[in-house]
Amino acid sequence: MTMRTAIKAPPRSIMSTCAKPQHKAAARMVGYALTLGDADGYADLADVLALRLTQAECAGLAYACVRAMDDNTAMMVTDNAMGVEQPQLASPEFMQAAVEYRRARNRGMRR
C-alpha cells in the first residue's frame, strides 16, 4: 500500500494577493530594467510607469530614487530628465559651481 500525501501550494505573498495589477506590472518592469541595465531598458520602464501609475505614484518613485543618490548624481540625472544640456567634459570648477548651485537651490528644503 502506498500512502498519498497532498502537496500544498506555497502560500501566496501579500504582493500577489493584495497589490493592484498595475502595481505588479510596474514592479516587474522595474526588475526587467534593472536586469537589462541599459538606456533602452530604462526608457521602456519610463513608458510603462507612465501607463501604469498615477502622477503621484511616479512622483513618489522619482523622489525615492533621487533621495537614494549622492548630490552630484542626483543633479545630473534630474537635469538630464528635464532636458538640461550637460557639457561633455565637466571641469572641476564647473562641477563645484554645479554643486554650489544645487545646494543654494535646495537651501531650506530637506532632502
Image (spheres, grey):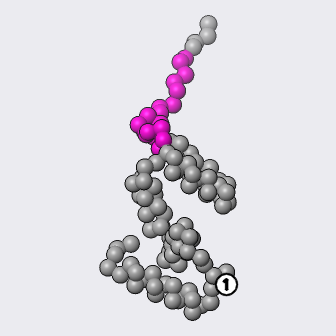
Q: Say which residue appears at 62% left-offset and 49% top-offset.
A: 32
The residue at the far left in this view is 108
Question: Which residue is disc 1 drawn over?
Answer: 89
- Residue 94 coordinates in the image, percent (x, y): 57, 89
- Residue 76 coordinates in the image, percent (x, y): 55, 75
The reply to whether residue 27 is visible in this rendering is: no
- Amino acid marked by disc 1: Leu
Queried whether the magenta region covers residue 99, the answer comes back as: no
Q: Give above or below for 16 relative to 84.
A: above
Q: Secondary structure at mark 1?
A: loop
In this view, the residue in front, 5 or 108, is 108
Q: Say which residue appears at 49% left-offset and 45% top-offset.
A: 52
Specify few, some or many for label 1: CA neighbours under 10 Å numbering under 14, 14-19, or 20 or more: few
- Residue 69 coordinates in the image, percent (x, y): 50, 70
The magenta stretch spans which residues? 5-23
The reply to whether residue 91 is visible in this rendering is: yes
Q: Give above or below for 77 relative to 88.
A: above
Q: Quadrant of residue 91?
A: bottom right
